């Protein structure tokens, strides 16, 4: 029979969640103080921002490659 154990995780820990870092940077770069003609245009810009860089650049930007991660 398999054994499972519980692991407590904090509700909000952006320093431990790379996606939170990328999301925040995307919001700052794409959404902050900008008015788009449609939500579709804004979504496309955000998707381009997130998927544009190489995998290595994304890992670096999100902090995953940091020695403290």
Image (cartoon, rainbow, N blue to C red):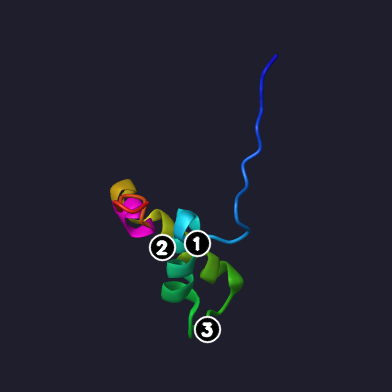
Question: Would residue 63 be found to the left or right of residue 3 on screen?
Answer: left
Instruction: Give whichever of 49, 5 is nearer the camera.
Output: 5
SS at circle 2? helix
What's the CA distance linking mark 2 and mark 3?
17 Å
Kindly indicate the quadrant of the structure image that contains residue 30: bottom left
Instruction: Find out whether residue 61 is within the magenta segment.
Output: yes
Residue positioned most to the top: 1
Residue visible at 53% across and 79% down in the picture: 36
Between disc 3 and disc 1, the foreground one is: 1
Which residue was labeled with disc 1? Answer: 14
Which residue was labeled with disc 2? Answer: 49
Answer yes or no: do the residues labelled 3 and 1 have beta carbons within 8 Å? no
Residue visible at 42% across and 68% down in the picture: 25
SS at circle 1? helix
Q: Earlier in the sequence, mark 3 or mark 1?
A: 1
What's the CA distance linking mark 3 and mark 1?
27 Å
Residue 62 pos. (x, y %): 38, 57
Q: Earlier in the sequence, mark 2 or mark 3?
A: 3
Residue visible at 45% across and 62% down in the picture: 21
Which residue was labeled with disc 3? Answer: 35
Q: Which mark is residue 51?
A: none
| Range drawn in magenta | 57-62
Instruction: Find out whether residue 15 is within the magenta segment.
Output: no
Q: Residues within 10 Å of mark 1 (few under 14, many from 20)?
A: few
């Amino acid at each position: 029979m398999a054994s499972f154990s519980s692991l407590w995780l904090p509700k909000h820990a952006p320093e431990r969640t790379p996606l939170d870092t990328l999301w925040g940077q995307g919001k700052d770069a794409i959404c902050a103080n900008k008015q788009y003609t449609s939500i579709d245009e804004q979504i496309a810009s955000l998707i381009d921002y997130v998927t544009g860089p190489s995998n290595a650049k994304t890992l670096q930007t999100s902090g995953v490659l940091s020695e403290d991660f």
